[in-house]
Amino acid sequence: MRPIATVNLHEQLGRIHEHWKPRIAGELNGQQVKLVKFLGEFVWHHHQHEDELFLVVKGRFRMDFRDREVWLEEGEFLIVPRGVEHRPVAEEEVQVLLFEPGSTLNTGNVQDERTVRELERI
């Protein structure tokens, strides 16, 4: 059994110094709560079997879709359904909480230098 403990998002995000490299902050029912910082453009990708939730903790970013773009502000979240091609873009550093199945690969169907197969726990 895992210990019952609170997680301070600001404190844990303050320990992250790399962009686009998610860290596992918690797990429940096969889902993972991940913390990550974005800066710049990510790769266009999709997740064939997983939905993803993006919650902006600090800052703002744009989620590009092939037919539109959506801005997410601090305190807002967006769910990207499985199979939908998307690309996060952050003009300035943004702190994000991800909630998604543990099987979710950060670059989805794309394999490149930003692909993180083994996530660190914080």
Image: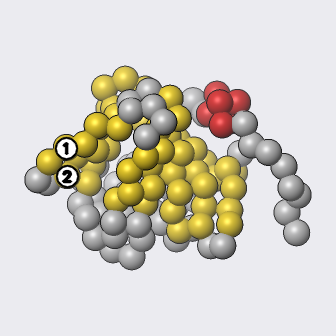
Quarter the N terminus occupies = bottom right
The kind of secondary structure element at disc 2 is strand
Residue 97, can we see it?
A: yes
Per the image, label 1 sits on a secondary structure element best described as strand
Which residue is identified by label 1? 69
* In the rendered image, the vertical position of residue 61 relative to residue 81, given as above or below: above
Residue 48's spot in the image, x, y percent?
A: 33, 74
Left or right, 21 with respect to 113, comes to: right
| Quadrant placement of the C terminus | top right
Rendered residue at 37%/23% (across/down)? 92
Q: Quadrant of residue 105?
A: bottom left
Give the Cα separation between the discs numbered 1 and 2: 6 Å
**Tag 2: residue type?**
Phe
List x then y, in percent, for residue 58: 50, 29
Q: Position of residue 111 (x, y in %)?
A: 34, 61
* Crowdedness near tag 1: few (<14), some (14–19) or many (≥20) residues, C-alpha within 10 Å: some
The answer to which quarter of the image holds residue 71 is top left
Q: Is residue 106 above or below residue 94?
A: below
Q: Amino acid at mark 1?
A: Glu
Q: Is residue 94 visible?
A: no
**Does the CB distance between marks 1 and 2 fall below 8 Å?**
yes
The outermost residue toward the top is 92
At 27% from the left and 48% from the top, the residue drawn is 87
Judging depth in this view, the residue of 90 and 6 nearest the camera is 6
Q: Examine the rendered structure and indicate whether residue 93 appears above or below residue 43.
A: above
Q: Which mark is residue 65?
A: 2
